[in-house]
Amino acid sequence: MPKNWMKIVVLLLVVPFFLFGATLKEYHPSGFKSNGKKVYGWSWLQKNGDYAEWTFTFPGPQTFKDGTVVFCFTALSTNKKGGGAGYDSSLNIVWHQGMRPVKVDLKNDCGCLEQFASRVPNSRGMGYMSHGCIKMRVKASQIGHGRNRRWGLILKVKYPGGHHTALKKDSVKMYVVK
C-alpha cells in the first residue's frame, strides 16, 4: 500500500465533489473509549467482547449532505499477542442503534514482512501498521445528557476474531461531503 494512502483516498473523494460544487470536511473524534488491553497508548482488541468506541460531535443535524461518510482507520495489526509483523486484520463496525455488523478490512503496509514471522516471532511493533477505509450512510443524532447534549454519532468496532488489532483516539478520521 502506498505510503501516502490517506492522501490518495482524500484526493479521489475531493476531485469529483470539487467539480460538482461540494466540499469534503474531515472530522476527528472528540472522545474514545475501549475495553481492550492498553499497551503504550494503544488499546488491543484480542478476544471476543473487546471493543473500541469513538464519539464524533457536529454543529447540527445538517452536517451530512446526503448521509454518506467515509471512515478511514489507521491501526496496528498482528497475528497473536506479542506477534509478528506483516499481517492484515479486520473489525466489525456496530452502531449503538443495533444494526448488523459491517466488516472493514485493514491492510498491512508491508505484507511481505509476514515471511519473517517464523524466524522473528515478536517484531516489537515493526511492520504492524495497517489501514482501511469504508464508505457508509449514517445519521447524526442527539447524544449526551442535559447540558452536554449535542449532535453527533458514536462509531463502535468490535473484535471479530482472527488477527489482533490495536486502536487509539486518533485511529479513525471521518470524511463528510458538505
Image: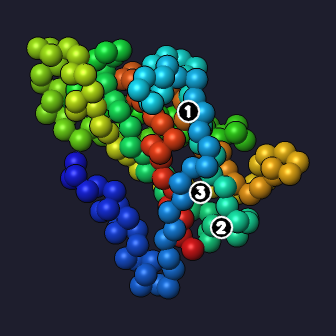
Q: Nearer the viewer, residue 41 or 161?
A: 41
Q: Amino acid at mark 3?
A: Arg
Q: Residue at x 21, y 53 (%)?
A: 2
- Closest to the camera, between mark 3 and mark 2, is 2
Badge 3 local density, few (<14 within 10 Å), some, or many (20+)?
few
Q: Earlier in the sequence, mark 1 or mark 3?
A: 1
Q: Residue at x 31, y 20 (%)?
A: 79
Question: Gap in Å between the C-alphas at discs 1 and 3?
Answer: 20 Å
Q: Nearer the viewer, residue 106 or 6?
A: 6
The residue to which callout 1 is attached is 52
Q: Earlier in the sequence, mark 1 or mark 2?
A: 1
Tag of residue 137: 3
Helix or strand or loop: what does disc 3 sit on? strand
Image height of 167 relative to 136, above or below: above
Q: Amino acid at mark 2?
A: Thr
Badge 2 local density, few (<14 within 10 Å), some, or many (20+)?
some
Image height of 139 relative to 13, above or below: above
Q: Residue at x 34, y 44 (%)?
A: 131
The residue to which callout 2 is attached is 63
Badge 1 local density, few (<14 within 10 Å), some, or many (20+)?
many
Helix or strand or loop: what does disc 2 sit on? helix
Query: x, y percentage for residue 177?
Result: 53, 70
Tag of residue 14: none
Helix or strand or loop: what does disc 1 sit on? strand
Quadrant assignment, res 5:
bottom left
| Mark 3 and mark 2 residues within 8 Å of each other at the beta carbon | no
| Mark 1 and mark 3 residues within 8 Å of each other at the beta carbon | no
Q: Looking at this rendering, what residue extends furthest in the right direction?
A: 146
Left or right: 72 in relation to 131: right
Q: Amino acid at mark 1?
A: Ala
